[in-house]
Image (cartoon, rainbow, N blue to C red):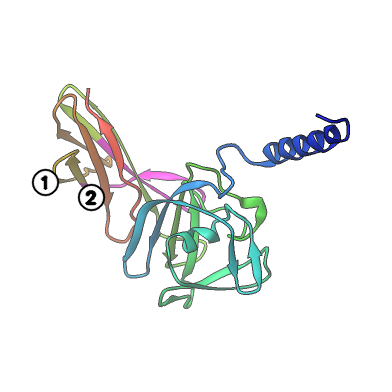
Amino acid sequence: MSSRAVPAVLAAAATLLAALAVAPPGASAAGPRVQALVVGMNGWTVGPRTVTVGPTRVGRCRLGAGLPIGVLRALGQPFRARGSCRALYVFQVRSDRERGAGGWVYKVGRRIPSSSASDPAGRLRSGARVTWFWCRRAGRCQHTLVTSARAAGGRMRVTVTGYDDFGRGRRVAGATVIVRMAGSSRRQTYRTGADGTVVVPVRRGRTYRVDSRRTGLVRGFPIEVRSR
């Protein structure tokens, strides 16, 4: 290698290292991979689905990869937004438009972030769970459901918890729990008691898909549980 080529090689290496240092953990060049779900005003849903949240354009705004507003684009949902590029507000998804105290919000995990869905400070990390949903009353949205379960000795205890805007949870009584064994199309349904839990029979060594629903609350993401 000639002495003239050395500086160019060193410069290219420095550029690559700098790019790697800036990239958030778990992110790819195309954008983070997240679990995404959209729940409309009358309960229609898209997802849950794992999507790559790449760069997108909203009106005149060119937005980078990994922003929550890009989740809607990744799921192929038509939406409308207004505001400055760093503070876009989604006021319509499909035909569901803001009205009165109701409108669209999103959660990352169990809580509603304080930042706009287009704010670069709110970039998503790979593995995040993002839920866009129609909130009936801004500031006091209906709770979103989270299902958890442990299985051992031929029994599985399922717990259903509802979370408010700030990620505060409480057990949900009367929730419908849907259980399906991997490789089977047969589903069995159960209902949580006053403590938000239900115990169901399972086979040892098998994997189960568990989900939950409750009228008036926002559905969550199904989970997989391996029985010991």
Q: Residue at x 22, y 44 (%)?
A: 192
Whether residue 228 sits left or right of residue 60 in the image: it is left
Q: Residue at x 63, y 61 (%)?
A: 63
Residue 62 occupies quadrant: bottom right
In the figure, 81 relative to 133: above or below? below
**Residue of label 2:** 174
In the figure, 117 relative to 1: above or below? below
In terms of sequence position, does the residue under pointer 1 or pointer 2 come before the other?
A: 2
Where the C terminus falls, by quadrant? top left
Any mark on residue 186, and which?
Answer: 1
Residue 49 image point, x, y percent: 37, 52
Residue 138 image point, x, y percent: 50, 66
Query: Gap between marks 1 and 2, in whole Å?
Result: 22 Å
Whether residue 27 sits left or right of residue 220 in the image: it is right
Circle 1 or circle 2, nearest the eye: 1
Q: Which residues are magenta?
A: 158-177
Residue 137 image point, x, y percent: 46, 67
Whether residue 187 sits left or right of residue 31 in the image: it is left
Residue 5 occupies quadrant: top right
In the figure, 47 relative to 20: above or below? below
- Residue type indicated by callout 1: Arg
Residue 97 falls within the magenta-colored stretch = no
Residue 215 image point, x, y percent: 27, 59
Of residue 72 and residue 135, the one placed in the foreground of this image is: 72
